[in-house]
Amino acid sequence: MNGTPNAVRLDTSLELLAERLVMLRGPCVVATVISATGSTYRKPGARMLLEPDGRITGLLSGGCFEQDLREHAAKILSKGVAGTVSYDMRADNDEIFGIGSGCEGCMEILLEPSHSGETCVSAIMEASAMSRRGQSVALATIHHAPDAELGTRLWHGRIEPPMREPLSSACAQAVDQRRSQPAFWTDAAYPREAWIEVVMPPPAVLICGAGPDTEPLVAGLRALRYPVTVFDHRSAYAKAENFPGATVVTGPAPSLARLVALNSFFAAVIISHHLESDASYLRALNSTEVEYIGLLGPRARRERLLSEIGGAAGAIEARLHAPIGLDIGAVTPEGIALAIVAEIHAAAAGRLGGSISRR
């Protein structure tokens, strides 16, 4: 690992909001962090959904100011106009807000009233759906502008009115650079500001093998809201009901490349416990762009499989993690799944996965 993040999105809280918004029929307030300094729980672009009955989806702090934010959201809903609220938690005593956060940062948040089908809700849901299909888009949260322009809009090659070219160009630049960033421009002598969040695809994971030990692995990956596809040549194992939220595909091992679009995946995990099938999966992954290939089993099994696939081994070895997973002393299927999920997450972040406290 070189410490450089890959072109994937690890913050899948957008999917958390999108899942709730599908069920939402009434009004809501979308809270978006537009700036943060110092030590804060979340960074610019993070979102939380607040509903009139007090229900929240997502977190912007570790519970430090969510109750206070509910009160502000209620006022925003009654006015029907977006507004901002700031929390400065850098002081030793918390006399202003009385929330006793213990944090050491400052955060500014845009509160945006919305409803099912309206601009903000549609932008979040479309951005989530498009990114899961492998597209990179942007969400522009305009927080300094005339009231009619405040709020979140989707950019996918263009941006919805009434926003104009300066913001669209800034979104295009951010997506091209794969870096979320602020934007500043002037229109009709009025200065505008927005936070542009680049929404890249989350790391899709292919799992070759649908045995019982695949179930906790899928559960762990789906808890992170990663798109997961499970492939197996055994129809008795490849049952959709065993893998909630995942796509399940059945076919002979040599048909993997024909039945599954392999280049759409960041990671592939080979966990079939069947030597001949594992060799077929490795051959199929040889000429792909899959960045992480994990193989379950000891080193001796890895060497045997690499010998089995012959010339194809050279193109795979640099991407191959075998034995798979971080060394956390895992012994149960759940522990092994945790080690694998952690290593995939680290690989997507361009990290080695060592202890934070020992850096």
Image: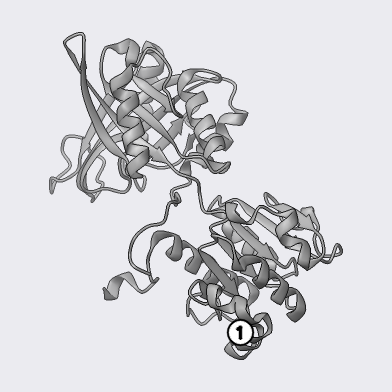
As shown in the figure, which amino acid type bears the numbered disc 1?
Arg
Residue drawn at x 32%, y 40% is 180
Coordinates of residue 338 in the picture (x, y in percent): 54, 69
Residue drawn at x 50%, y 33% is 127
Coordinates of residue 269 in the picture (x, y in percent): 61, 68
The answer to which of 5 and 20 lies nearer the viewer is 5
Coordinates of residue 265 in the picture (x, y in percent): 58, 55
The answer to which of 246 and 82 lies nearer the viewer is 246
- Above or below, comparing residue 130 to residue 144 in the picture: below
Q: Is residue 51 something that shows in the picture?
A: no
Indicate the quadrant containing the C terminus: top left, top right, bottom left or bottom right.
bottom left
- Above or below, comparing residue 218 to residue 315 in the picture: above
Q: Residue furthest front?
A: 311
Label 1, residues with CA under 10 Å away: few <14, some 14-19, many ≥20: some
Residue drawn at x 41%, y 42% is 59
- Above or below, comparing residue 284 to residue 112 in the picture: below
**Dot 1: what SS?**
helix
For residue 44, what is the image quadrant?
A: top left
- Above or below, comparing residue 64 to residue 331 in the picture: above
Indicate the quadrant containing the N terminus: top left, top right, bottom left or bottom right.
bottom left
- Tell whether 304 sits left or right of 26: right
Q: Residue furthest bottom?
A: 300
Residue tagged 1: 302
- Tell whether 280 sits left or right of 44: right
- Tell whether 11 sits left or right of 40: right
Q: Residue furthest right?
A: 236
Coordinates of residue 316 in the picture (x, y in percent): 55, 73
